[in-house]
């Protein structure tokens, strides 16, 4: 199989390795983004809980 960019010939094993490395990079990036989103949700939840604890029950926010 020929690579369009370099006109090099890659074996099926080399192609599989390239696909696996690309998959691993994507997985790392999405995991990092997901962990960041979870941390932000936790921070916002803690802020909301703290706000509710200091506000008398039944008090309107706006």
Image: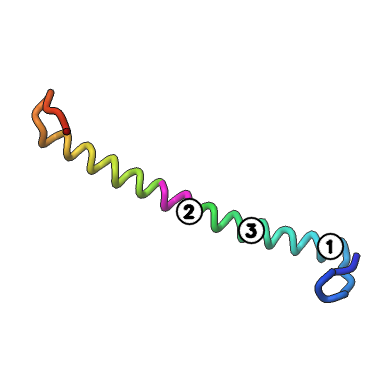
Q: Is residue 54 above or below residue 8?
A: above
Q: Residues in magenta?
A: 32-37
Secondary structure under the numbered disc 2 in the rendered image: helix
- Between disc 1 and disc 2, whose residue precedes? 1
Residue 14 position, x and y percent, is 81, 66
Residue 33 magenta-highlighted: yes
Residue drawn at the location 87% of the way across and 61% of the way down: 12
- Residue 15 falls inside the magenta stretch: no
Q: Which residue is mark 3?
A: 24
Residue pictured at 48% horizontal, 56% vertical: 32
Residue with the mark numbered 1: 13
**Residue tagged 2:** 33
Calculate the distance from the C-alpha at mark 1 to the C-alpha at mark 3. 16 Å
| Residue with the most extreme top position | 58
- Location of residue 8 in the rendering, given as x and y in whole percent from the top left corner: 87, 75
Between the residue at mark 1 and the residue at mark 2, the CA separation in whole angstroms equals 30 Å
| Rendered image quadrant of residue 27 | bottom right
Quadrant for the C terminus in the image: top left
Q: Residues within 10 Å of mark 3 (few under 14, many from 20)?
A: few
In contact (CB < 8 Å): disc 1 and disc 2: no
Horizontal side of residue 22 vs 62, given as left or right: right
């Amino acid at each position: 199989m020929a690579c369009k960019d370099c006109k090099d010939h890659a074996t099926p094993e080399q192609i599989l390795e390239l696909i696996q490395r690309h998959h691993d990079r994507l997985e790392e990036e999405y995991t990092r983004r997901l962990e960041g989103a979870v941390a932000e949700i936790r921070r916002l939840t803690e802020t909301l809980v703290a706000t509710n604890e200091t506000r008398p029950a039944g008090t309107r926010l706006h």
